[in-house]
Image: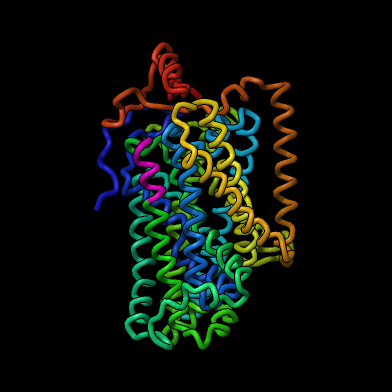
Amino acid sequence: MSTALPSPPASPNPKGGSLRRNTLSVFGAVAMCMAFMGPATSVAFNTPPAAAGAGYALPLAIVLAMVASLLVANTIAAFARKLPAAGFAYTYNSHGFGKSGGFLSGWLLLLTYGMVGPMLFAALGGYSHDFLDDRFDIRVPWQVMSLAFAAVVWGVNSLGVSSSARTALIFLVLEVGVLLGLAGVILGDGGDSGLSVAPFNPAESIDGFSGLGTGMLWGILMFIGFESVATLGEEARGAKRSIPLALFTAVAVIGTFYVLMAYSTSIGFGSAHGSDLAGDAAPLTTLVDRYWGVTWILALTVIVSQFANVVSGSNAAVRVLFSMGREGVLPRFLGRTNERHVPQSAITAYLGFSLVFALALGSGFGGDLGPLGVYGFAGTVLGLGMVIVYILMSIAVIRFYLREHRGEFALLRHGILPGATVLLMLLPIYGQLWPVPEHPNNLVPYVIVGWMVLGAAYLVWAHRSRPEVLAAMGRVFENEPGADAADTTGATDASTGASGAASTGVVSVPTGRT
């Protein structure tokens, strides 16, 4: 199935700063953010620490994580209905907190999404190296494999967001299909001690409610990436409707998948072996070996998952770079698109940075962490940073509706639910800070604090030397009225933009402006 209808030919725009409008369907947007979550990778890597606390009650912990993620989706959807822009939290929080708050949110998002590429290219290199060595006795340095995958991702993303969505969908179906097959075999066989609802009983948690909290922490990290669909606001058809729909659909579908896999894992080990599940460093590998008798298929599935993940994740990171470059916060060449309205400069710059970071940190600089060490370090920065971004957006959406759309403010949707999100998200922050993780992950809080100090210094300089940059923050690039039905690269003229701002509370400016 195609993820998007063909778009009319684009007019040449070598120096333009507009993305191709109306090129991504709801289905394509859902595929992109589900692939960014990396379902197979998340299940393989996050199940062990989640089960270490929740034990046999692992499925209940994942249900709680799914609820928390739906609350975050509510916050993002409330913004997306008013601000369909590629800047995501950068744009949202500019409207919620003002220009300075928006910049600092975007600055944190830049670091957070910046870790997606290094994390996944390192993992892809390491896993593919091990797979070829174990299965075929072919020894290719992991660095070479990382370079090869980066070249493929560059080619896919350079074709445009629709091509990326189709690629992500294909690999997403493969990874989810394999794990659903495993779940079907386990449940069809009755697991270790028969089917039961006991895994949803809090009393089955190894460490009680504290254990459920640990499981919920790692469950929330499984969902990170669903929010990336908001970065596609300028390219999605009918973005104000399609982005919220894609958000909730992605969380509900992949959340159900996560719960099913958690239930299958618990049933596969059995209630009598809950402690075995909690102490198994690779429970999924154990189950694949027990029920299928092979383990290489899991390794291949994880590689497939990581590839789909990096195709989607790099698109999200590139669009944040593009948005900040277009508004002059970052070098303006990052905010330009080619004749196909693809942010080629941002794609090349981001993938180049990702490779340098992964290869340098994994091959000697910083203590020779190796590919999995890079994966763990970059993933920790990503996880902690995104949870902070979720909290900031949840506070900002309350201020945004009270200040700019008071007549539409709904106490439950725009007040109580975002407040509950803030409280729930404090749990994963605590879980990532205490107990203090091993080196180098113990350095992550200092990296984030140092990055934000650097951002604050840049902000002070910009206030004094480049006030026009601050004035541009949070700008929303919208189509003309009715443009949802067609691909239009132009936008309203100055007079239309002024009237639109008066009626909607959103600033409309020419999309070609850089």
Q: Which residue corresponds to the image point at 33% horizontal and 77% vertical from the top-left?
A: 184
Q: Position of residue 22 (x, y in %)?
A: 32, 35
Q: Position of residue 145 (x, y in %)?
A: 51, 64
Q: Position of residue 383 (x, y in %)?
A: 60, 56
Rendering quarter of residue 333: top right
The front one of 20 and 446 is 446
The front one of 200 and 190 is 200
Q: Residue furthest top?
A: 495
Residue interval drawn in magenta:
239-248
Dominant SS in magenta: helix
The front one of 180 and 121 is 180
Q: Specify whether residue 418 is painted magenta.
A: no
Q: In the displayed structure, does residue 35 sit left or right of residue 437?
A: left
Q: In the displayed structure, does residue 8 sit left or right of residue 163?
A: left
Q: Which residue corresponds to the image point at 35% horizontal and 38% vertical from the top-left?
A: 241
Is any atom of residue 366 visible in this view?
yes
Q: Position of residue 308 (x, y in %)?
A: 42, 58
The front one of 448 and 488 is 448
